Amino acid sequence: MNPADLVHDRRGSGPPLVLLHGIGHHWRAWEPVLDRLAEHHDVIAVDLPGFGRSPLPESGLAGMPALVESLASFFTSLGIAQPRLADHDPDLSVVHRDGSVAGTVPVASRQPGPVANPTPPSPTALSALPANLTPPADRLPGEGTFPNRPATRHHPSAPSGTSPDRPSAEQTSEAGTPQDTGRLRTGGVDGGPHPPATPAGAAAATGLPHVAGNSLGGAIALELAAAGYVASATALSPAGFATARQLRYAVGVLTAHRMASRLPTPLVRTLFRSSRLRSVAFGMLISRPDRLTVERAVADAAALRGGRAFRAVVRASRGYTFTGAPAVPVTIAWGTRDLILPHRQAAAARRGLPDARHVDLPGCGHVPMSDDPDLVADVILRTTGARP
């Protein structure tokens, strides 16, 4: 598969920011926040290999290293990747917290410009791919647009063009927590200080994009950060911190959703005209399913049904745990009403990544972009350094 064949939507200007969805979803998972982010970044929302309209690699998906490699090559194909390698180092090593070497990125050339064929890390711990993943979400009604932010959509079988106006969803969660006067509860382990955010211009200076991902996409974002491919990473309810039992539960719920999505499209459309049935269908995924539109519910059900990589991802997920140690700014944000990867998994993330910034998303479900676009955009922009 040519990395350039990955379908993506691109809009805005500034340091590049790549958005990664979860299993069974597509780039449109990010629609509620795209225009907000495009005010500060060159935003690229991509269909992962074998999902949405992106092709499945001919060799299949061998696990997390294959996904990391695909995304690293995709960055290079767009001209947004230039690895930060010391002149004296023949290879850039990626090291886990226990001191083991996760893999190396060979220096193909020390001349300016992207490495043609970067080699991703291939640690034993990453031999499996996460399945705690994200099915469909939706953008919310009541949307506005940024008319000066043209968007282009790439598909290998169709020319790029201008996207229609994109609405922006309204805020859906209440401010603050019982202990805080603001909307976010943040902090490292024991409420410790966070590492400083990367200035937004750092991505351009280093030749590295920022990345944000949800669920499966969140795990990939963390792996990209650990491998040194990105300037910062924001992970929303990321896979990789669940126990074996929690993983089985998540896989079971998502598989059941996929089976239900196999109903004929005309019947699905008829059923989803009922707001009550839409709430039943999506209530495990988002906290405000009553705001889903019929069009988005049908489109997301089709994406879940058509995700050709779904089974491969589920098979490869057994035993996956994130064990990397990113050296760049990282934020992990968790919806307090996540019913797929419950919020208690955030405690495991805090233990595993004590130097990261940890944020609660009050009232949000597993796909927080739909539940509170303003809050999610703010979390991402604070990580990239676009906001203080």
Image (spheres, helix red, strand yellow):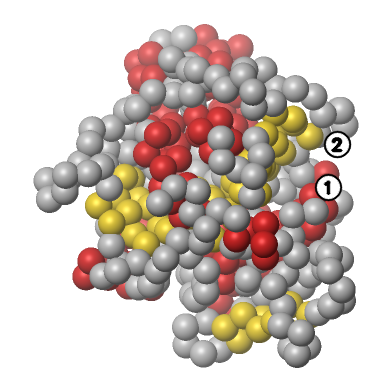
| Residue placed most toward the observer, 233 or 350 | 233
The residue at which mark 1 appears reads as 4
Q: From where the camera sits, is residue 236 visible? A: no
Question: 356 left or right of 110?
Answer: left
In the rendered view, would you say 257 is above or below 206?
A: above
Rendered location of residue 47, percent (x, y) = 68, 42
Would you call the spot at circle 2 few (<14 residues within 10 Å), some (14-19), or many (20 or more)?
some
Would you call the spot at circle 1 few (<14 residues within 10 Å), some (14-19), or many (20 or more)?
some
Rendered location of residue 127, percent (x, y) = 62, 72
Q: Residue at x 79, y 70 (%)?
A: 118
In the rendered view, would you say 3 is above or below 299?
A: below
In the structure shown, which secondary structural element does the residue marked by tag 2 occupy?
loop
Q: Earlier in the sequence, mark 2 or mark 1?
A: 1
Q: Identify the disc placed on residue 342.
A: none
> In the rendered structure, are the residues bearing label 2 and label 1 in contact, judged by CB atoms less than 8 Å apart?
yes
Q: Residue at x 81, y 79 (%)?
A: 107
Amino acid type, mark 2: Pro
Among the 4 quarters of the image, the one containing residue 29: top right
Rendered location of residue 187, percent (x, y) = 28, 62
The residue at which mark 2 appears reads as 156
Question: 140 left or right of 117?
Answer: left
Q: CA distance from mark 2 to mark 1?
A: 8 Å
Tag count: 2
Amino acid type, mark 1: Ala
Q: Residue at x 35, y 66 (%)?
A: 194
In the rendered view, would you say 278 is above or below 364?
A: above
Q: From where the camera sits, is residue 224 visible? A: yes
| Residue placed most toward the observer, 210 or 297 | 210
Rendered location of residue 299, percent (x, y) = 60, 24
Q: Residue at x 56, y 16 (%)?
A: 295
Question: 289 left or right of 239?
Answer: left
In the structure shown, which secondary structural element does the residue marked by tag 1 occupy?
helix
